[in-house]
Image: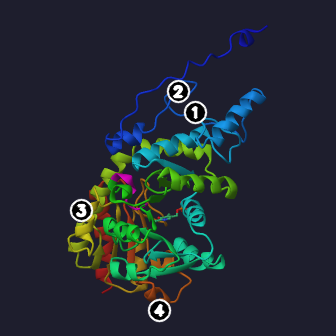
């Protein structure tokens, strides 16, 4: 016999490990939240790259099946579409960060949103969403769900009587985003939750733009929170993932449907996400700092028409944001004094920000929504959606803010020269 066969790896007995408690700060939780021992005692989570799992014998298999039947989330798995230990580690961490009982990871933010809504909305029901929502979410709610006999009413953000008036006997759910994109509107979550609960409705909030460092919707009475983990959570513009977190009883059927619909995350992406999460606290601090400084600079600049940033007292939702959020984030939208083409010339004159959609990574990204996201629409159609030709969306990264401001200053000079 070889030494390898005579000396099998002996796994130490499972012991309770000390967890950072739920009262720990968000940076502590993003580093340690939900930590559990693994068989190798490795500090970093092992990447379990497998499509399926083995059982020692039939008794072992039956024990696993019983555990599932008792409704426990087993600490082992049958097949990778139903679960994976690397992915489970991310889910535990994100659940603690959101102060949620449970979380499920998906292959993208849209997978999290669509699977959650398909799970919670039976045929014949109705949902209310707020306008200025992520474009694909709005299309899914107003067009795709209609094919399944699920109807949708879109109400203006900040109009709580319109929200309440839109509720019908068949309404099941209110979906909203905060802050929104591109106008950074902030929803009063306490007010929204109060209306929803009075009518027995489930509330789902997409808070991708805030991250759990700046806002935790469950603390304000919201039932479920969804994120595109592609953005701030992963933080490096190098992977796609999504998450939904909330009460265990709401999450269980979503997890079951994920196992059927199959928008499962990938264990390598999960490991990268865990790595990104460790720096979430310091990254968000910098995004918040850069966002505030750039918004204040732009608001003072003569070539800038209007600035939307919840940290500015001039923003329509500043008071709600100041009460509800720990920081105002790294996204700033503004209109410049110029038409569609002049705005494009300003964007092209920037040297540090890269022209790209998305946000939440280290790099500052810039986009002119009229060109980037709404290119195929006419100017009138864009106006109807509130997308102005001279609107610029700046997703601030973590560069030195003095460099970003100097770059904006020189690029805004292009507008002055062209009247
Ligand atoms: C990016 C984004 C999504 C979609 O997430 P993906 O990971 O790209 O699928 C949903 N909602 C918001 C607010 C987003 O910014």
Residue 396 vertical placement versus 146 (above, below): above
Decide if residue 237 is in sight here: no
Residue nearest the viewer, comparing 1 with 362: 1
Do callouts 4 and 1 mark residues in contact (Cβ within 8 Å)? Answer: no
Which x, y percent locates residue 241?
A: 55, 54
Mark 2 or 4, which is nearer the eye?
Answer: 2
Applied colour scheme: rainbow
Mark 2 or 3, which is nearer the eye?
Answer: 3
Residue 42 shows which numbered tag?
Answer: 2
What residue appears at the point 35 percent right and 51 percent down from the top-left corner?
A: 213
Label 2 vs 4, first from the N-terminus = 2
What residue appears at the point 41 percent right and 78 percent down from the top-left corner?
A: 345
Density class for disc 4 (Cα within 10 Å; few <14, some 14-19, many ≥20) is few
Which x, y percent locates residue 187?
A: 34, 69
Assign a secondary structure to mark 3. Answer: helix
Which x, y percent locates residue 111?
A: 59, 61
Residue 380 shows which numbered tag?
Answer: 4
Density class for disc 2 (Cα within 10 Å; few <14, some 14-19, many ≥20) is few
Do callouts 2 and 4 mark residues in contact (Cβ within 8 Å)? Answer: no
> Which residues make up the magenta segment?
208-213
Q: CA distance from mark 4 to mark 1?
A: 53 Å
State the quadrant of the N terminus: top right
Q: Residue furthest bottom?
A: 380
Do callouts 1 and 2 mark residues in contact (Cβ within 8 Å)? Answer: yes
Residue nearest the viewer, comparing 415 with 203: 203
User: Does 221 lie within the magenta span?
Assistant: no
User: Does 211 lie within the magenta span?
Assistant: yes
């Amino acid at each position: 016999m070889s030494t390898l066969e005579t000396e099998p790896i002996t796994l130490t007995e499972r012991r309770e490990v000390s967890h950072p408690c739920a009262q720990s700060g968000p940076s502590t939780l993003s580093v340690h939240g939900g930590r559990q021992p693994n068989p190798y005692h490795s500090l970093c989570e092992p990447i379990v790259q497998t499509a399926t799992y083995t059982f020692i014998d039939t008794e072992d298999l039956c024990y696993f099946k019983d555990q599932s039947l008792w409704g426990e989330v087993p600490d082992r798995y049958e097949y990778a579409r139903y679960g994976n230990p690397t992915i489970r580690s991310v889910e535990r961490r994100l659940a603690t960060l959101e102060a949620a009982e449970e979380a499920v990871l998906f292959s993208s933010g849209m997978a999290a949103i669509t699977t959650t809504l398909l799970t919670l909305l039976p045929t014949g029901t109705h949902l209310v969403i707020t306008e200025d929502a992520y474009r694909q979410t709005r299309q899914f709610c107003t067009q795709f769900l209609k094919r399944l006999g699920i109807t949708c009413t879109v109400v203006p953000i900040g109009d709580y009587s319109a929200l309440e008036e839109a509720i019908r006997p068949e309404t099941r759910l209110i979906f909203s985003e905060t802050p929104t994109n591109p106008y950074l509107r902030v929803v009063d979550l306490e007010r929204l939750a109060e209306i929803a609960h009075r009518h027995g409705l489930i509330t789902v909030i997409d808070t991708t733009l805030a991250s759990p460092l700046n806002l935790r919707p469950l603390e304000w009475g919201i039932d479920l929170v969804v994120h595109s983990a592609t953005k701030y959570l992963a933080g490096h513009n190098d992977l796609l993932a999504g998450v939904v977190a909330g009460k265990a009883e709401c999450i269980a059927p979503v997890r079951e449907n994920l196992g059927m619909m199959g928008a499962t995350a990938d264990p390598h992406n999960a490991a990268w996400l865990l790595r990104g999460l460790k720096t979430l606290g310091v990254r968000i601090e910098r995004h918040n700092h850069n966002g505030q400084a750039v918004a204040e600079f732009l608001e003072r600049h003569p070539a800038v028409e209007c600035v939307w940033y919840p940290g500015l007292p001039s923003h329509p939702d500043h008071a709600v944001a100041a009460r509800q959020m720990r920081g105002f984030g790294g996204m700033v939208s503004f209109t410049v004094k110029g038409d569609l083409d002049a705005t494009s010339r300003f964007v092209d004159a920037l040297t540090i920000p890269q022209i790209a959609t998305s946000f939440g990574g280290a790099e500052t990204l810039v986009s002119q929504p009229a060109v980037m996201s709404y290119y195929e629409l006419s100017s009138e159609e864009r106006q109807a959606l509130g997308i102005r030709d001279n609107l610029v969306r700046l997703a601030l990264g973590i560069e030195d803010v003095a460099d970003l401001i100097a770059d904006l200053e020189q690029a805004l000079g292009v507008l002055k020269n062209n009247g």
